[in-house]
Amino acid sequence: MKIVFTSCMDAERVADQVIWKRIAQEHPDVLMLLGDQIYMDWGVGLATAFWPALIAAQPEQGLEAYARDMHRRYALQWGVAAFRELICGFAGRADKGQLLLTWDDHDFAWNNSLGVVGEGPAYQHGVPARVKAVSRRLFAQFAIQLREASAHDRYPDDLPAEWSAPLPLGEPEDLFWSGTLGGGATAHLACFWTPAGTARRVLWAPAFSAPSRPPP
C-alpha cells in the first residue's frame, strides 16, 4: 500500500505547486492532507497578533473579515490546477480511509494556535469559540469540495450557511474518525484521526496488518 503524506501548502505565495503532478505519478492508495492547507497569518500585518486584535476590537466586522479571508485562501488553493487535478483524479477521495484531511495551526487560526482558551502564558494563542466555529465550517466546506467537486467546478462563491453560528455540543463527528486506511488496498492500517488544532498535534496509532499470503 502506498501512502502519501502532505502538508504546508500556500497558494498565496506559491501558486504553481508542481509537486502535486509528481504525487499523481505515484498513484497513491492513501492521500493524507496533514494541515496548513492555507496560512491565515501570512500577509496580514503583524501575523499572529493581527486577527485576535481585530476580532477583539471589532467582534462582528472582524469575525466576518476573518471568515472571508479564510474563504478566499481556500479558494486559492482549490484554484491550483495540479492540486485540483490530483484530488479529482484520486479514485478514493470519497472514502475517509483513503483521503484524510486535518488542519494544523495556520488553517485552524494563526501561528501556534491552541484550541483551548485560558489564563496565563500557556494560553496566549488560544482561539475563542466563535473563531473556532468559523474555522470549522470553512474547513468543512473545503473538505466537501475536495470529496465531491469536479476539476472544472469553481470554488463556492460565498461563505457556508450559518458560518458564524455556535458549534453544536458533543464530539465533532466530521473531525474525528477511526477506521481502516487503504480502502481496497491489500494491506491495511488501523487509524484514529483527530484534528491537530484541537490537541496541537495529530494523534494516530498505526497497527500494521500484513495481507494474508497464499500457501506455497
Image (tube, helix red, strand yellow):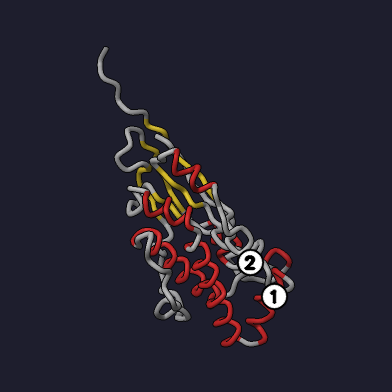
Does residue 28 appear to the left or right of 212 in the view shown?
right
- Residue type indicated by callout 1: Phe
Identify whether 183 is placed above or below 14: above
Image coordinates for residue 73, horizontal then vertical, percent: 55, 68
Does label 2 or label 1 sit earlier along the sequence?
Answer: 1
- Taking the image as drawn, is residue 109 in sight? yes
In percent of the image, x 41 and y 43: which residue is there?
Answer: 30
Query: Closest to the observer: 183 or 38?
Result: 38
Image coordinates for residue 212, horizontal then vertical, percent: 30, 25
Give the quarter of the figure containing the N terminus: top left
In percent of the image, x 63 and y 81: which residue is there?
Answer: 55
Query: Closest to the observer: 207 or 94?
Result: 94
Q: Quadrant of residue 94?
A: bottom left
User: Are discs 2 and 1 less than 8 Å apart at CB?
Assistant: yes
Q: Which residue is mark 2?
A: 110
- Taking the image as drawn, is residue 199 in sight? no
Q: Which residue is mark 1?
A: 50
Callout 2: few (<14), some (14-19), or many (20+) C-alpha neighbours within 10 Å? many
- Residue type indicated by callout 2: Trp
